[in-house]
Image: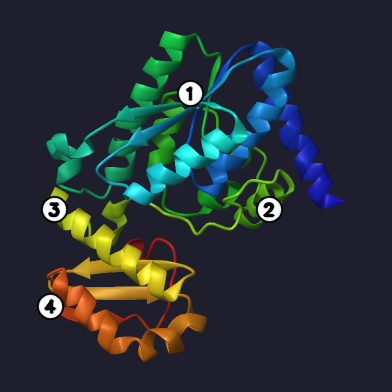
Amino acid sequence: MEGLERLEELKERMAGYAADGDLCVAFSGGVDSALVLAAAMEAASPLGRKVYAVTFSTKLHGMGDLEAAERVARELGAVHRIIEVDELAQEEIRNNPRNRCYLCKKSLFVELKRFASEVGAAWCLEGTNGDDLHSWRPGLQALKELEIESPLALLGISKEEVRALAKQYGVSVAHRPSSPCMATRLPYGTVLDHELLRRIDAAESRLRTWLGGNVRLRLHGDVARIEVDRERFGQALMLNDDIVLELKKYGFHYVTLDLEGFRSGSMDE
């Protein structure tokens, strides 16, 4: 019953947004924003409202994210728009300070608000969920300042509930692992370099192909620290030689497996 109640709460909130006009959804292609987009489409379509799925093509997200966003937006029938952004053109973000997420979110969502104004959308929505409110998320302040609506967070919908609801909507990325920005792979204060981020992204994509599940490649100077789900440790060790050889091709001198396993936000520990 709780799942049905959650679904009805989400539908009711989306109906309220759609009653005011067209909607603009910040759409990464991940499960959170995909659920928001699916619910927005369901609420807006009977009213003849448009829903714009706006994806930022940035230097801090892998190419796989953009491909997923294009596919899922097409599956859900939204009007998909891509906004090209180079966050690293801003020195303050490039220096990767501890409030980087705030600076980056502010930069991106100013662009979203501008786009929404151009197309006359009544609301800007995004996919922060209830669990995100309990971790270090300086970007949430930027959303508040810009009056971006976060329906999943406002309803207290957890990540587990997001996946369950996305499955009910038939969203194809319901079980896709989270894919946060590439800057989270580096310690705060490490200058963000286009080429370095590209190498991390490529190496991590290879690891994900081999190991599946949640994979993060964190870089500490010359040391590449691999985080995977603990149940994947055996597989990682079996592929030890291949993994070391592959990562050294990308210029990482030392390759380690983090025995604590995957955990989101480990650079904030």
Identify which amino acid the numbered label 1 is placed on: Glu
Q: Which mark is residue 47?
A: none
Q: Residue at x 35, y 23 (%)?
A: 110
Q: Are marks 1 and 2 in contact (CB under 8 Å)?
A: no
Q: Position of residue 46 (x, y in %)?
A: 75, 18
Point out the tag, 1 or 4, that comes first from the N-terminus: 1
Identify residue for label 2: 161
User: Could you tell me how far apart the alpha carbons at marks 3 and 1 are, in whole angstroms?
Assistant: 34 Å
Say which of marks 2 and 4 sits in front.
4
Q: CA distance from mark 1 to mark 4?
A: 45 Å
Q: Earlier in the sequence, mark 3 or mark 2?
A: 2
Q: CA distance from mark 1 to mark 2?
A: 25 Å
N-terminal label among 1 and 2: 1
3 or 1: tag closer to the N-terminus? 1
Q: Nearer the viewer, mark 3 or mark 1?
A: 3
Q: Are marks 3 and 2 in contact (CB under 8 Å)?
A: no
Q: As shown in the figure, which amino acid type bears the numbered disc 4?
A: His
Of helix, strand and loop, which one carries label 3?
Answer: helix
> Contact, CB < 8 Å: mark 4 with mark 3?
no
- The residue under label 4 is 253
- Residue ranking furthest to the right: 1
Q: CA–CA distance between discs 4 and 3?
A: 16 Å
Question: The residue under label 2 is which amino acid type?
Answer: Glu
Mark 2 Cα-neighbour bin, 10 Å: few <14, some 14–19, many ≥20:
some
Which residue has dot 3 on it? 195
Which element carries disc 2, helix, strand or loop? helix
Contact (CB < 8 A) between labels 3 and 1? no
Quick check: 56 left or right of 255?
right
Residue that label 1 marks: 147
- Residue 256 figure quarter: bottom left
